Image: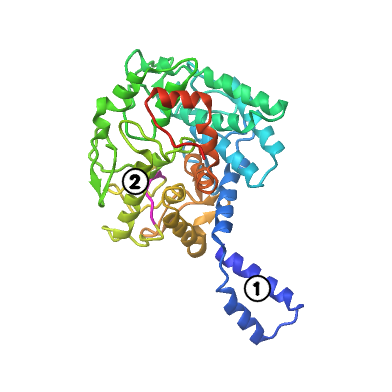
Amino acid sequence: MRLFLISMTIAALLVGCNGQSSKSKLREQSQNVEQIKITDEQLLDSVQKQTFNYFWEGAEPTSGLARERIHLDDIYPTHHKDIITIGGSGFGVMAILVGIERGFITREMGLERLEKAVDFLDNADRFHGAWPHWLTPDGKMTPFSKKDNGGDLVETAFLIEGLLTVKEYFKDGNQREQELAQHIQQLWEEVEWDWYTKGENVLYWHWSPEYEWDMNFPVGGYNEALIMYILAAASPTHPISKEVYDQGWARDGAISKDTTFYGLPTVLDHYESDSSPVGPMFWAHYSFTGLNPKGLKDQYADYWELNKNHTMIQYKYAVDNPKNFKGYGENLWGLTSSYSMKGYAGHRPDRDISVISPTAALSSMPYAPKESMAFLRNLYTNHDTLVGKYGPYDAFSLEENWVLPRYLAIDQGPIPVMIENHRSGLFWMLFMTNKDIVKGLDKLGFSVASPQ
């Protein structure tokens, strides 16, 4: 990108000289070009448009939803290129709203795509109202793993989070827009959150008509699934009780047993059965694409402090660079789950193999704007070979000289959405004004910031 910008600027300068230039003028112009700097706003526009296009131009055509992955090298070793991701589509429908707001597409174009997506979801396989992790273009479930061939409540939560922001965006519009909002409300009300407790005070991640509860994955915090518990409590038709949140998610208060890492409190215990001090960065993103952490508190945490500290711990770790990995520092940081030299892996400070995942820093823009902006500028001006058609590639290692031209929906999706929350607060405003969500948060004992 840097070379492209310089070339375009040189061309503009030459045209400005009416096509007449001397060697001395050209040298002078070339020296001036190096001083031309793209603004922060232009950089943010660029990365938002590129990542939005993953979900616009790169969408699975039958459904209009997000492909699980897009590999520009056209090598798909395990799954077909048209597998639809439910969680990634939740971020994707929010990215469509970014496209409308930033003028990448018209409102009419966005509405038409979202109508198509919601119609597809209404007719796709569901299991007690919950969608599976993956769908095929005919709307049928395809297994994520052998026994994971039914409802996936966490992925469904990310989808519903996105759909509810779409509902709020269009609910007061014209007749078509209001009908879309009503259709989304129908899908939301059909998710049987209480079914997934199995009659216990905890939510289970999976249920399969073939294997039933064999996956046996009760979800306790802290991790990316906070939004699942909040949606389950907020459901107007199939709600859970506060006891499910307190005993299941908060583990009877054990979630509050935090630690200190790089001089900052982690606020919550990041792992129920692991000694790692902090998790991958996506934990500060997925639930908070819609859920506004500013001023959000309950008996267990201040969620703004939680996410800011998580971000700054990872930033400080990269600056410290205890393993002396190439490139790590103030403008190159961020570990999360992503592709790697060893396949898909969860990266965090105590499990660092030199793989930087751009979504980690870029989706943290609301929490660390200066540090995230430094990462963005460094990537786009000094490492432009790590950026492709749909924005930064999923992951890279300067230490190992490794990168692949490949993308994952769950990594690209939070980038335009969280950057928009940083720039305008759009999704935080939309989600937090949903009447069901307001009631759910109150039910669980959350206090929220007063609307601006």
Magenta highlight on residue 337: yes
Q: Residues within 10 Å of mark 1 (few under 14, many from 20)?
A: some
Residue name at image x 31 percent, y 24 percent: 246
* Location of residue 232 in the rendering, given as x and y in whole percent from the top left corner: 43, 22
Residue name at image x 73 percent, y 74 percent: 15
Name the one closer to the observer, 309 or 270: 309
The amino acid marked with disc number 2 is His
**On screen, residue 366 above or below 96:** below
Q: Confirm whether residue 177 shows in the render.
A: yes
Image side of residue 309 versus residue 157, left or right: left
- Chain part drawn in magenta: 333-338
Q: Classify the position of the N terminus by image quarter.
A: bottom right
Residue corresponding to mark 2: 310
Which of labels 1 and 2 is toward the front? 2
SS label for mark 2: helix
Residue corresponding to mark 1: 10
Q: Please tell me the numbered disc located at residue 124.
A: none
Identify the mark nearer the N-term, 1 or 2. Answer: 1
